[in-house]
């Protein structure tokens, strides 16, 4: 069933209309295989200035709801935890004065009256549990450990930056660093040679607010090593990763990363050193592999060249 929210944020089930989702500029009902119960860690967002759209089960026609029971109502969305990919976005009709929203993935949300629970339209695409939010402690252990790390390394700006990511943005990767498990982030680059439409750390000349701050300094080799070595030494199957959501393109800092990784490998020959990258500088990838990087993820919004260029807007390289 379709859901909606009043001006106080109370979420209501519409008694008659079925849920619709948005695919591009079109609205459609979800397919049976696209609907799942909302995963643990899902956030529910009211979308101001946007009226919910549902489907009349009798006629199959779309209906826009402006008010219910004498109260104005607004669309509601699901923001999924990591490891899930959306099938459909939230179906709504925006008012002319609707405020611009931050860059989140506003996924279709509905209500299953039989199971008496919220449902969404998504599929799990990553089985790894490293960022499953139900596995994080509820007592703020990682915040305490982040504060301890900052006190122990007052001159390490990278530790301070990651502590901010942990405590303010609740970044799962930063939280895992201070919980001494899984994959730890190593942001290094302020610059980027892509101008991705949906960049979450920098929006220039745009009314769309970025969801987090980009790193504002170039870490030193020592600062990187001081984060990476203890993590790889103490975490079984540990991973450290360059190219995080709070930075630009790490291949633009290949010299710095290569020197840091070479230093890390002198202390810890095992473990995984990963780089998340747009893949724009293959020669830099080769040098980093020589230094000890042994894992690579390439960002690719589309395998269609025209769509790739429209989204990534590459500077100095092409699809």
Image: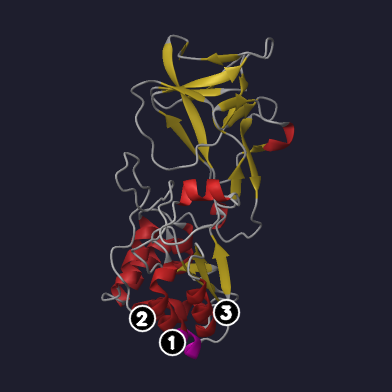
Alpha-carbon span between mark 1 and mark 3: 14 Å
Q: Secondary structure at mark 3?
A: loop
Figure check: 306 above or below 282: above
**CB contact under 8 Å: marks 2 and 1:** yes
The image shows residue 196 at horizontal and vertical percentages of 43, 51
> Which is nearer the N-term, disc 1 or disc 3?
1
Residue 268 relative to residue 35: left or right: left
> Which dot marks residue 96?
none
Q: Quadrant of residue 142?
A: bottom left
> Which dot marks residue 221?
2
Q: Secondary structure at mark 2?
A: helix
Query: Which corner quadrant holds the N terminus?
Result: top right
The image shows residue 34 at horizontal and vertical percentages of 69, 36
Q: Secondary structure at mark 1?
A: helix
Number of the front mark, 3 or 2 = 2
Residue 95 relative to residue 235: left or right: left
The image shows residue 105 at horizontal and vertical percentages of 50, 41
Residue that numbered label 3 is attached to: 271
Q: Which residues are magenta?
A: 262-267
Image point (48%, 25%), residue name:
75
**CB contact under 8 Å: marks 3 and 2:** no
The image shows residue 189 at horizontal and vertical percentages of 37, 67
> Which is nearer the N-term, disc 2 or disc 1?
2
Can residue 297 be spotted in the picture? yes
Residue that numbered label 1 is attached to: 263
Alpha-carbon span between mark 2 and mark 1: 8 Å
**Crowd tier of the residue under label 1, counting other residues whose Cα lies within 10 Å: few below 14, some 14–19, many 20 or above:** some
**Crowd tier of the residue under label 3, counting other residues whose Cα lies within 10 Å: few below 14, some 14–19, many 20 or above:** some
Image point (58%, 83%), residue name:
270
Asked whether 43 or 189 is in front, the reply is 189
């Amino acid at each position: 069933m379709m859901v909606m929210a009043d001006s106080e944020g109370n979420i209501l089930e519409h008694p008659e209309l079925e849920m619709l989702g948005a695919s591009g500029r079109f609205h459609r009902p979800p397919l049976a295989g696209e609907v799942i119960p909302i995963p643990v860690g899902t956030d529910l967002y009211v979308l101001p200035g946007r009226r919910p759209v549902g489907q009349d089960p009798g006629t199959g026609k779309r209906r826009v709801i402006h008010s219910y029971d004498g109260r104005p109502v607004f669309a509601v969305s699901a923001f999924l935890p990591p490891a899930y990919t959306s099938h459909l976005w939230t179906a709504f009709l925006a008012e002319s004065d609707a405020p611009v929203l931050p860059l989140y993935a506003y996924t279709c949300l509905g209500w299953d009256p039989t199971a008496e629970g919220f449902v969404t339209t998504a599929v799990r695409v990553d089985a790894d549990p490293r960022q499953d939010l139900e596995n994080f402690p509820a007592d703020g252990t990682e915040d305490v450990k982040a504060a301890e790390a900052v006190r122990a390394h007052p001159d390490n700006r990278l530790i301070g930056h990651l502590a901010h990511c942990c405590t303010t943005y609740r970044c799962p990767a930063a939280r895992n660093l201070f919980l001494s498990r899984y994959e730890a982030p190593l942001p290094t680059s302020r610059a980027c040679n892509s101008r991705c439409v949906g960049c979450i750390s920098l929006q220039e000349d745009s009314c769309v607010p970025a969801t987090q701050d980009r790193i504002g300094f170039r870490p030193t080799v020592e600062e990187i090593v001081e984060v990476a070595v203890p993590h790889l030494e103490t975490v079984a199957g540990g991973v450290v990763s360059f190219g995080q959501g709070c930075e630009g393109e790490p291949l633009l800092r290949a010299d710095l990363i290569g020197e840091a990784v070479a230093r890390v490998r002198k202390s810890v020959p095992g473990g995984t050193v990963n780089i998340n990258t747009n893949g724009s500088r293959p020669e830099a990838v080769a040098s980093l592999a020589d230094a000890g990087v042994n894992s690579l993820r390439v960002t690719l919004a589309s395998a269609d060249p025209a769509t790739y260029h429209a989204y990534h807007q590459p500077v100095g390289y092409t699809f």
